[in-house]
Image: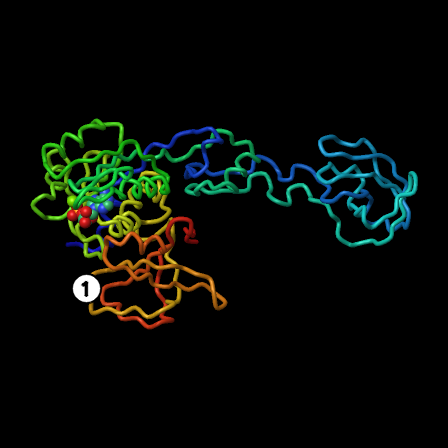
């Protein structure tokens, strides 16, 4: 059995980045950028009014100005503003030549073709050319995940077909004679398959695509038949739920060997998730995930996700090294309650709930009955990292947390 650090090291070493691709900007949301975004010109590209009002020379402290014309957004007003003169202007319009300040319309009284200044502020109310970014400035680096704001920045600079990481294609097989589809009422001894839904969500949340999902009973022949259903090629990662252990009906390792996969590790000193296995076949990766939902959630976060990130180019240019938790960084937080426990030699990830309160963030441990307790992890939004032998811990102790879905923070 190896340590989690060693397991992550092997995943990082064996899994290679997929070739990046260009996509339409409308499809780029959620993708990882594989080229830098450099400002092609100054932003803003021209001096713009930041308020509705009257454009004047800022050094002209006259109490009254003659209105010489009007400047609307989208067109240049031909008027040159001189002493004692102003131009009626609206937010976003090009500043007329000569003008360097907008007096807010609330601060003047308009009388015919003149304005009388009631109050003069020293604020210019002008967005100066290049004040956001100069031409040539680095706006987004390689490896940034494109959220709504980052994608809209691409729109601003006209990058309509950005180079982004390809989405790894995942195939997923759940195993077990006890499973029925969620729409079916379970018979005696049966349970509904919740892992297919869980894994689909985790895969999509990691920027990958679920290409195929299936179910096999605990019988090697049928297991292999189902595994061959999505074809040999056309996918990058195979996930097998259940059958990861060494029981009589745990066919995962045998099935992978039959398919020509080479086992890279089987068994990690990890709780939950000890039977986790990782294998490769050429550029394809496979994981055996212990069937319990909590184990699934944890091993996905600490191991499978790394492979999917690596395929999306994380670490390709020296960023991240597999030791860092680059996406969904570790955050030190105070424990909201004591954590009991003996001298456990296994590295543990304990479901936690990060909450704001008492002037800061803290993490409350979530009580879970077993690694099958999906009801408990439905309340969790983080994993508390406990190195071997860390327990017991008092309330207030500082623990490292992996923020989960919806709460991922970038490291630097
Ligand atoms: P296994 O790893 O196959 O021994 O499964 C461990 C536990 O997880 C057993 O209690 C299974 O019934 C349960 N389990 C396995 N697969 C699923 C699934 N797809 N949905 C819900 N529970 C599952
Ligand atoms: Mg099973």
Q: Label 1's element? A: loop
Q: Which residue is mark 1?
A: 345
In the rendered image, which quarter contains the N terminus?
A: bottom left
Of residue 64 and residue 319, the one placed in the foreground of this image is 64
Q: Farthest residue in the left direction?
A: 248
**Quadrant location of the C terminus in the rendered image:** bottom left
Q: Residue at x 21, y 69 (%)?
A: 342
In the picture, measured across the screen, residue 96 lies left or right of residue 309, that is right
Residue 187 at x, y percent in the picture = 19, 42
Q: Along the line of sight, which residue is nearer the eye, 137 or 152?
A: 152
Mark 1 Cα within 10 Å, few/some/many (few <14, many 20+)?
some
From the viewer's side, name the closer residue of 246 and 25.
Answer: 246
What residue is shown at x 47% (from left), y 65% (from top)?
357
Residue drawn at x 79%, y 32% as measured from the top left: 77
Quadrant of the rendered structure where residue 212 is? top left
**How is the rendered protein coloured?**
rainbow
- Residue 200 in view here: yes
């Amino acid at each position: 059995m190896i340590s989690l650090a060693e397991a992550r090291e092997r995943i990082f070493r064996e899994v290679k980045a997929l070739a990046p691709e260009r996509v339409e900007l409308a499809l780029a949301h959620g993708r990882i950028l594989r080229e830098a975004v450099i400002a092609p010109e100054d932003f803003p590209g021209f001096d713009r009014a930041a308020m509705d009002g009257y454009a004047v020379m800022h050094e002209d402290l006259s109490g009254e100005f003659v209105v010489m014309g009007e400047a609307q957004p989208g067109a240049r007003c031909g008027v040159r503003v001189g002493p004692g003169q102003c131009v009626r202007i609206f937010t976003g319009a090009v500043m007329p030549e000569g003008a360097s300040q907008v007096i807010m319309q609330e601060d003047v009284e308009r009388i015919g073709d003149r304005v009388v200044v009631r109050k003069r502020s020293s604020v210019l109310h002008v967005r100066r050319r290049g004040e956001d970014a100069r031409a040539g400035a680095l706006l987004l680096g390689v490896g940034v995940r494109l959220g709504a704001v980052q994608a809209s920045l691409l729109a601003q600079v006209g990058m309509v077909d950005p180079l982004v990481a390809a989405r790894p294609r995942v195939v997923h097989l759940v195993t077990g004679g006890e499973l029925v589809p969620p729409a079916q009422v379970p018979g005696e001894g049966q349970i509904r398959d919740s892992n297919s839904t869980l894994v689909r969500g985790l895969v999509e949340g990691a920027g990958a695509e679920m290409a195929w999902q299936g179910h096999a009973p605990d019988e090697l022949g049928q297991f292999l038949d189902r595994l061959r259903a999505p074809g040999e090629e056309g996918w990058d990662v195979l996930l097998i739920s259940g059958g990861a252990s060494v029981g009589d009906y745990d066919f995962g390792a045998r099935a992978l060997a039959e398919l020509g996969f080479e086992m890279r590790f089987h068994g990690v000193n990890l709780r939950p998730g000890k039977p986790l296995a990782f294998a490769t076949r050429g550029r394809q990766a496979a994981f055996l995930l212990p069937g319990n939902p909590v184990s699934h959630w944890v091993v996905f976060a600490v191991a499978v996700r790394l492979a999917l990130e690596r395929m999306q180019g994380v670490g390709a240019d020296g960023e991240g090294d597999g030791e860092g938790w680059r996406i969904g960084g570790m955050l030190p937080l105070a424990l909201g309650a004591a954590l009991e426990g003996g001298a456990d030699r296994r590295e543990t990830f304990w479901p936690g709930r990060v909450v704001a309160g008492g002037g800061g963030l803290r993490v409350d441990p979530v009580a879970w009955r077993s690694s099958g307790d999906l009801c408990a992890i439905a309340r969790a939004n983080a994993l508390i990292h406990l190195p071997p032998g860390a327990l017991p811990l008092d309330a207030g102790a500082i623990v490292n947390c992996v923020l989960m879905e919806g709460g991922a923070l970038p490291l630097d």
